[in-house]
């Protein structure tokens, strides 16, 4: 299990939470990101140079007109106000965020800044010429760099008529799910918040106590233009209920199963470890032991498990503090997937009461029956941390 830090300010190493999945480091962008950043910087420099040039042209008076009339041939500069257009067919993919209620000009500005179109005016003209442009939906659109404006409008329209795919990973919290849903669908966050505040509208059972945590099933959902926040959340709740019914779980046990499964989801890195973690949790509960699960404490404290301090684990006001309160936490701490639910329903046979991830890169987890054996594995983790910074 976990050995807290020696003082209230020093961090507690999360011995339970699985190591985070690798994410791209924004400080070291890939080749395409580098090219896009370079192009944006070049556009910014061209814009600043153009301002200086305009001032110079005004000062030289009539001579300026002659220079301005030949500016394109002399410099090749463009501005977002000119009706410049790319010949196409387009280059690398780039994601562009179309805001809720965006006008054609606002869309054009976003596309211009992303390097998709050569000018705002060219896009606006193409937008106004396409009668289907009113169908364009807010949200994240995958475009191509340096597209003809007409093709950019057509692609936005096509995106609006193609059903979106909303994928919710296992172990996401409600807040993370809402953030992902807003990003993919373009629906306002306030719509999801309003739906969550009316649990009956999304089919949340009474035993959930009005809290959707644990009940939003991680899966891939098809999103149509007519879908609403209430509709999407209802699908997720219904999917969770369906999974429990398929496994013949008694309705009275649904909340307990989801709470345990959420702990297993956040603690287990490998699928084969999850039935062992489920058994260890049951063994500790049967013996009246504190669960001492960092992931639960972190959820209640509203912080990552790697940032916990001894003060956090000693705070009795946190109802999810499994160092201070025996039994299960008051509810799920995340939304578990099928593997974690099955692990709770079919835990592996064994006497384990402790587990610790000893390698945060591979997720290797070791289990122990007694505290002395567990401490040898904790030291193994400490040694790994010392060797890996």
Image (tube, helix red, strand yellow):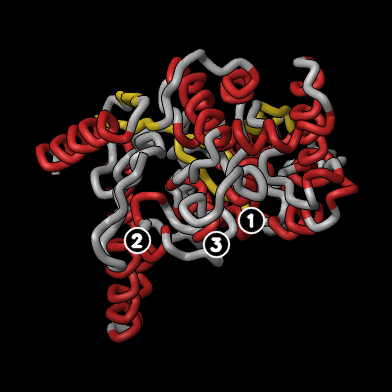
Q: Would residue 221 be found to the left or right of residue 66 on screen?
A: right
Query: Rounded to the nearest whole Å, what is the CA distance between mark 1 and mark 2?
Result: 43 Å
Work out whether residue 286 or residue 43 is closer to the camera in this orientation and state it. Answer: 286
Q: Earlier in the sequence, mark 3 or mark 1?
A: 1
Q: Nearer the viewer, mark 3 or mark 1?
A: 3
Is residue 87 something that shows in the picture? no
> Where is mark 1, residue-wise?
99
Question: Can you give x and y, in whole percent of width and height, for residue 277 in the image?
Answer: 47, 26
Work out whether residue 276 or residue 214 is closer to the camera in this orientation and state it. Answer: 276
Question: Can you give x and y, in whole percent of width and height, for residue 324 in the image?
Answer: 50, 56
The image quarter in which residue 135 lies: top right
Q: Would residue 313 be found to the left or right of residue 222 on screen?
A: left
Residue at image position (60%, 31%) is 261
> Where is mark 2, residue-wise?
310
Work out whether residue 119 or residue 265 is closer to the camera in this orientation and state it. Answer: 265
Residue at image position (46%, 52%) is 323
Question: Can you give x and y, in whole percent of width and height, for residue 30 in the image?
Answer: 28, 36
Q: Secondary structure at mark 2?
A: helix
Q: Earlier in the sequence, mark 3 or mark 2?
A: 2
Asked if marks 3 and 1 touch (Cβ < 8 Å), the reply is: no
Query: Rounded to the nearest whole Å, what is the CA distance between mark 3 and mark 2?
Result: 13 Å
> Where is mark 3, residue-wise?
318
Is residue 94 something that shows in the picture? yes
The C terminus sits in image quarter: top left
């Amino acid at each position: 299990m976990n050995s807290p830090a020696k003082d209230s300010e020093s961090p507690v190493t999360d011995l339970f939470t699985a190591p985070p999945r690798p994410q791209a480091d924004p400080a070291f962008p890939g080749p395409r990101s580098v090219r896009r950043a370079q192009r944006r910087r070049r556009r910014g420099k061209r814009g600043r140079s153009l301002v200086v040039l305009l001032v110079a042209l005004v000062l030289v008076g009539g001579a300026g007109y002659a220079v301005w009339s030949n500016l394109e041939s002399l410099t090749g500069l463009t501005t977002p106000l000119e009706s410049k257009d790319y010949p196409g067919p387009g280059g690398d993919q780039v994601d562009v965020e179309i805001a809720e209620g965006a006008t054609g000009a606002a869309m054009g500005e976003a596309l211009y800044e992303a390097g998709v179109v050569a000018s705002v005016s060219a896009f606006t003209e193409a937008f106004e010429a396409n009668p289907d442009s009113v169908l364009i939906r807010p949200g994240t659109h995958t475009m191509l760099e340096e597209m003809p404006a007409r093709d950019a409008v057509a692609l936005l329209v096509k995106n609006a008529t193609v059903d979106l795919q909303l994928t919710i990973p296992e172990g996401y919290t409600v807040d993370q799910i809402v953030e992902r849903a807003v990003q993919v669908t373009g629906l306002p966050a306030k719509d999801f918040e309003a739906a969550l505040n009316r649990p009956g509208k999304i089919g949340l059972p009474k035993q959930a106590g009005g809290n959707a945590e644990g009940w939003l099933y991680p899966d891939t959902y098809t999103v149509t233009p007519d879908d609403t926040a209430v509709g999407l959340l209802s699908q997720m709740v219904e999917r969770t209920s369906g999974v429990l019914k398929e496994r013949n779980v008694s309705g009275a046990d649904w909340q307990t199963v989801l709470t345990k499964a959420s702990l297993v989801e956040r603690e287990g890195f490998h699928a084969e470890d999850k039935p062992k973690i489920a058994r260890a949790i049951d063994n500790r509960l049967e013996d009246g032991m504190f669960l001492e699960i960092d992931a639960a404490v972190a959820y209640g404290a509203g912080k990552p498990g790697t940032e916990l301090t001894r003060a956090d684990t000693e705070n009795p006001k946190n109802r999810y503090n499994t160092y201070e309160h025996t039994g299960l936490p008051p509810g799920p701490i995340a939304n578990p997937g099928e593997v974690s639910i099955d692990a709770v329903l079919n835990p592996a046979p064994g006497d384990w009461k402790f587990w610790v991830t000893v390698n945060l890169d591979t997720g290797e987890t070791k289990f122990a029956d007694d505290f002395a054996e567990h401490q040898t594995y904790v030291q193994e983790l400490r040694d790994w941390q010392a060797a890996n910074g």
